[in-house]
Image: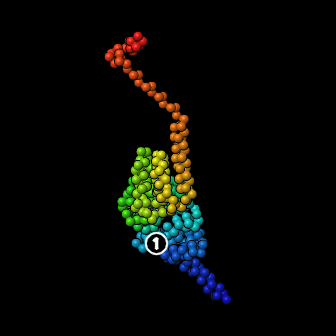
């Protein structure tokens, strides 16, 4: 009986020892399993044990696994525990310790979103996205577009214009080209004295991408620019083109109705002014010269002669 108790006492510490000596890769897998089981705190513990086991290792495999574990910690804080402050710290740790890893590219992109959305630090977000772009990732066109949007939010419309123009030129076949053209037109329209350039860009989008969902929006914005210049007929023409595919046709119809009412009002005012205008004085007929006046005499002399 004593021997069986002794045997059991030996088994338990041995099991604990085996658990502590799990390889880092196994720890990472256990962390993933915990996330699948909706146990983020256990996942964090497993990721950290994996990192402890990798602390003294510098092989290529160990560096890859370290990046995976570090990003696993960051993602767990952000996606599972919704702890933004801890997530920011963890993503920065990935970037600092594994600058060349694939995980760092993803970490920069996610961190940029957090900085922009949760901290409203748009310039810091731009810095992270620019660093991600420097690695020429597959999603470069999308990241360029995100940078341009951030500059627009900052009110730096000239830089937004430059970013979108570069996207259109560099990624001609990208699905983001029509988005970039529309954003470029908006940015140009916000710059003083650039109305004509903005009109040209809004006109260009539906011609180049007639099937784009942004085409009716481009026509609508074009109509607004025309209307602001009192080019009412051109505004209505642009809005009619927008009407067929615009997601909010009532909005377009309202704009058309406003301008038509303005045209009618202007016509009525012109008619009223014409009706109540003071008539021009009628010129008196020219005095017919007498024979004396024709010969160089005065009107008084002529009167005297005829009076005689």
Counting every numbered tag in the picture gives 1
- Image quarter for residue 184? bottom left
Q: Position of residue 169 (x, y in %)?
A: 36, 60
Q: Depth check: 244 or 150 in front?
A: 244
Query: Can you say whether 76 is above or below 9 in the image?
Result: above
Q: Position of residue 229 (x, y in %)?
A: 46, 46
Q: Quadrant of the N terminus?
A: bottom right
Give the labeled residue for mark 1: 65
- Image quarter for residue 307? top left
Identity of the residue drawn at 60% across and 72% down: 39
Identity of the residue drawn at 38% across and 60% down: 168
Identity of the residue drawn at 43% across and 48% down: 195
Report if residue 163 is visible in the image. no
36 sits to left or right of 122:
right
Query: Can you say whether 19 is above or below 196 in the image?
Result: below
Q: Position of residue 123 (x, y in %)?
A: 46, 53
Q: Position of residue 108 (x, y in %)?
A: 46, 62
Residue sitting farthest toward the left:
295
Q: Depth check: 117 or 27 in front?
A: 117
- Image quarter for residue 56? bottom left
Q: Tag 1, which secondary structure?
A: helix
Q: Quadrant of the C terminus?
A: top left
Identity of the residue drawn at 50% across and 32% down: 279
């Amino acid at each position: 009986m004593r021997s069986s108790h002794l045997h059991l006492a030996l088994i338990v510490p041995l099991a604990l020892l085996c658990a502590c000596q799990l390889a880092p890769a196994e720890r990472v897998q256990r962390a993933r399993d915990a996330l699948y089981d909706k146990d983020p705190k256990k996942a964090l513990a497993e990721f950290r044990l994996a990192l402890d086991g990798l602390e003294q290792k510098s092989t290529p495999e160990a560096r890859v696994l370290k990046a995976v574990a570090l990003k696993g910690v960051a993602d767990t804080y952000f996606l599972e525990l919704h702890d933004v402050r801890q997530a920011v710290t963890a993503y920065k740790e990935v970037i600092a310790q594994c600058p060349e890893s694939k995980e760092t590219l993803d970490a920069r992109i996610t961190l940029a979103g957090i900085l922009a959305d949760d901290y409203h630090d748009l310039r810091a977000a731009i810095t992270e996205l620019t660093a991600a772009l420097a690695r020429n990732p597959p999603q470069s066109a999308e990241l360029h577009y995100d940078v341009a949007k951030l500059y627009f939010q900052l009110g730096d419309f000239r830089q937004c214009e430059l970013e979108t123009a570069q996207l259109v030129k560099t990624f001609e076949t990208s699905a983001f080209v029509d988005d970039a053209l529309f954003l470029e037109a908006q940015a140009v329209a916000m710059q003083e004295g650039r109305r004509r350039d903005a009109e040209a860009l809004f006109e260009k989008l539906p011609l180049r991408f007639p099937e784009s969902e942004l085409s009716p929006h481009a026509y609508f914005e074009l109509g607004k620019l025309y209307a602001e210049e009192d080019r009412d007929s051109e505004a209505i023409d642009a809005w009619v083109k927008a009407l067929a595919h615009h997601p909010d046709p009532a909005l377009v119809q309202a704009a058309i109705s406003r301008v038509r009412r303005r045209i009618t009002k202007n016509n009525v005012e012109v008619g009223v002014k014409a009706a109540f205008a003071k008539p021009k004085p009628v010129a008196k007929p020219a005095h017919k010269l007498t024979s004396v006046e024709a010969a160089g005499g005065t009107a008084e002399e002529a009167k005297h002669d005829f009076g005689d």
